[in-house]
Image (cartoon, grey):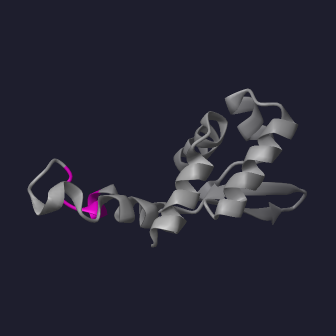
């Protein structure tokens, strides 16, 4: 991952509502959530939620699939893990620290 890619992902997460949406999708795991459930959980109006889901999807942090009449949004764990690995690649300049490797942060969803 390049600096510009990481900056793009961090910018997408740098808004409180988008961060809350992404975190809710991470908690939901591979099953994902429908916009209706997300809106209810987060107390966001549908238009606001749609705007933030579009931004997260455009950044590649979230994807959507159709399940019958519903869209189901899921966090892209591969992309999330790549960002975490990028951010922690040179953790503590090679010195021992609490997080020994980026792999300890990895989600296997």
Query: Residue 99: percent from the left, percent from the top?
Result: 21, 52
Q: Residue furthest right?
A: 69
Q: In the picture provided, is 60 more to the left or to the right than 39?
A: left
Q: Residue furthest top?
A: 43
Query: Residue 97: percent from the left, percent from the top?
Result: 13, 50
Q: In the picture provided, is 31 more to the left or to the right than 47?
A: left
Which residue appears at 64% of the width and 57% of the height?
74
- Count of numbered circles on the image: 0
Q: In the picture provided, is 43 more to the left or to the right than 82?
A: right
Query: Does residue 71 sit above or below 20 in this rendering?
Result: below
Which residues lie in the magenta part? 99-104
Query: Residue 10: percent from the left, percent from the top?
Result: 53, 52
Q: Nearer the viewer, residue 65 or 22?
A: 22
The reply to whether the magenta stretch includes residue 31 is no
Quarter placement of the N terminus: bottom left
Which residue appears at 83% of the width and 31% of the height?
45
Which residue appears at 76% of the width and 65% of the height?
65
Residue 35 visible to an observer of this rendering: no
Query: Does residue 82 sit above or below 74 in this rendering?
Result: below
Q: Residue furthest left?
A: 96
Name the quadrant containing residue 70: bottom right
Q: Nearer the viewer, residue 50 or 71?
A: 50
The reply to whether the magenta stretch includes residue 100 is yes
Query: Does residue 4 sit above or below 36 in this rendering?
Result: below
Residue 89 visible to an observer of this rendering: yes
Which residue appears at 58% of the width and 51% of the height?
11
Query: Residue 87: percent from the left, percent from the top?
Result: 36, 59
């Amino acid at each position: 991952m390049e600096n510009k890619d990481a900056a793009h992902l961090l910018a997408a997460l740098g808004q409180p509502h988008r961060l809350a949406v992404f975190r809710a999708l991470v908690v939901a795991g591979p099953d994902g959530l429908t916009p209706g459930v997300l809106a209810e959980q987060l107390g966001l109006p549908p238009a606001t939620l749609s705007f933030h889901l579009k931004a997260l999807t455009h950044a590649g942090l979230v994807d959507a699939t159709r399940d019958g009449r519903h869209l189901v949004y899921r966090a892209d764990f591969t992309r999330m893990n790549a960002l975490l690995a990028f951010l922690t690649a040179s953790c503590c300049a090679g010195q021992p620290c609490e997080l020994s490797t980026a792999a300890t942060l990895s989600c296997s969803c």
